[in-house]
Amino acid sequence: MLILQLAVQPNARRNEIVGLHAAYLKVRLQARAVDGHANEALIEFLAQCFGIPRAQVALVRGRSSRFKAVSVRSPTRFPLSIAALIERERTGFSLGTGITRD
């Protein structure tokens, strides 16, 4: 299982993982942060990115905050943007990835 530490920006032009924001992965979402729409959009977006069903993605912390922790169970693939961040961390070119293994 992966635990992603995310900084989420709602009301964006498109859904995308854009890089790091301090020690968080920054994710932009088109959904508005009203009535949980952004949280649902985040779960759907991450499920698509990792190639897994929505049920394998869960919001762990930060329901009403832009800083969130999300668990991802048994991903079948890694988004290229996250893979690049992991590689930079492995080779020492980054301070943190916002990703931990549980």
Image: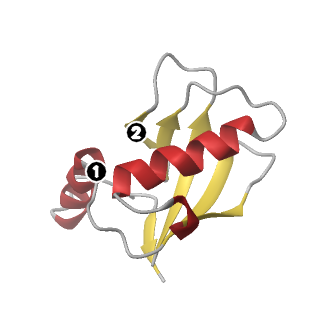
For residue 78, above or below residue 66: below
In this orientation, does residue 11 appear? yes
Residue 13: give x, y in percent of width and height: 49, 16
Identified by mark 1, the residue type is Pro
Looking at the image, which is closer to me, 31 or 97?
31
Residue 98: give x, y in percent of width and height: 46, 59
Q: Which residue is mark 1?
A: 79
Q: Secondary structure at mark 2?
A: strand
Identified by mark 2, the residue type is Ile
Whether pointer 1 and pointer 2 mark residues with C-beta atoms closer than 8 Å, the reply is yes
For residue 76, above or below residue 23: below
Q: Which residue is mark 2?
A: 17
For residue 52, above or below residue 12: below
Looking at the image, which is closer to me, 3 or 20?
3
Image quarter for residue 68? bottom right
Q: Tell whether 59 sits left or right of 25.
A: right
Distance (Cα) linking label 1 and label 2: 9 Å
Looking at the image, which is closer to me, 83 or 21?
83
Q: Earlier in the sequence, mark 1 or mark 2?
A: 2
Q: Tell me the quadrant of the picture where the N terminus can be found.
A: bottom left
